[in-house]
Image (tube, rainbow, N blue to C red):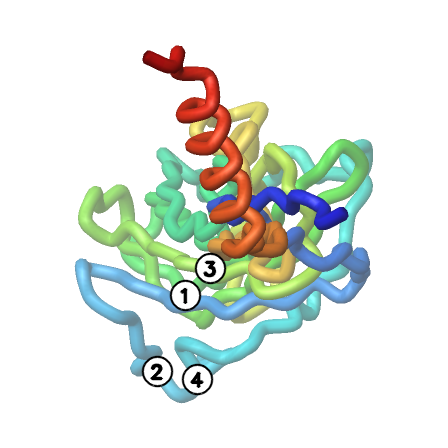
Amino acid sequence: MMMLKQTLKPLFVLMGITALQAPALAETTERTTEAREFQFGEAYTPKDGDFIRNDTLASVTKATKSSKKRAAVNAVVNTDFWIYDAWTERFNDADYDGYATTVSVSFDADTVYAEVPVYAVLYLGDADNFYPAHESSVFYIYGESTSDEFVIETDLITGYRPFDYDIMIELYDAQTNELLAVADHTSDADLSYVPLESQDYDRVIVEQETVVEVREHGGALHWPFLAGLLGMGIWRTVSRRPRR
């Protein structure tokens, strides 16, 4: 007896989007940055050779100042110098998580004197410590001028986990290294809770299209067997007709 085989040839194409998970991040304690400096609306280049501390404007910076516990942060020390205002801008967020990898800090430092050579140290603070992110070139401030603001644009390269950082600016006398003025989150709200992360944390999750094909195959119907069934059906129909 011949067995009847069904023919099943469905084709299922499953289209899916599979997210490739970013590799686990190994937390590093080495904090590195790249910085650019601006004054008077253009890239800043130190002019006075006697006071040049850093003659590169875009080099990897490992600040010479050490980290500071929040409790050890200095108060204002010299009434002849002050930071009148400071503000920030953020750029570059490849993974769109709200934490940028570039921060631009602008500040207007003033003095009672006509002109003074100074330098600044920029810190980023988490819940426990302030970490030095950049030590600037020597630049001049001119009395209470509103046009001599100094800008430090810093790319965070490694070591800064995603966090709402507080920013601190220390202003130093370039001739004596005396601390002249401090601005931080307690004196200027623009320096508080700035969402940042370094580039080693700014990982993009790549999406890849995946195509999965599922095929089912069955045997074909045996045509001689089908012809036999058809013939048997015709024979039964003819044999049942009444005879005249």
At label 4, the amino acid type is Asp
Q: Secondary structure at mark 3?
A: strand
Q: Which mark is residue 117?
A: 1
Q: Secondary structure at mark 2?
A: loop
Q: Pointers 4 and 1 in contact (CB under 8 A)? A: no
Query: Between disc 4 and disc 3, whose residue precedes?
Result: 4
Separation of marks 4 and 1 at Cα, in angstroms: 15 Å
- Label 1 CA crowd tier, 10 Å (few <14, some 14–19, many 20+): some
Q: Position of residue 196 (x, y in %)?
A: 55, 43
Q: Which mark is residue 154?
A: 3
Query: Between disc 4 and disc 2, whose residue precedes?
Result: 2
Q: Is residue 182 visible?
A: no
At label 2, the amino acid type is Asp
Separation of marks 4 and 3 at Cα, in angstroms: 16 Å
At label 1, the amino acid type is Pro
> For mark 2, what is the residue?
48
Q: Residue at x 58, y 65 (%)?
A: 157
Q: Position of residue 132 (x, y in %)?
A: 66, 56
Q: Which mark is residue 55?
A: 4
Left or right of 85, for residue 169: right
Relative to 180, does residue 51 appear above or below in the rendering? Answer: below
Relative to 143, does residue 49 appear above or below in the rendering? Answer: below
Q: Residue at x 31, y 59 (%)?
A: 115
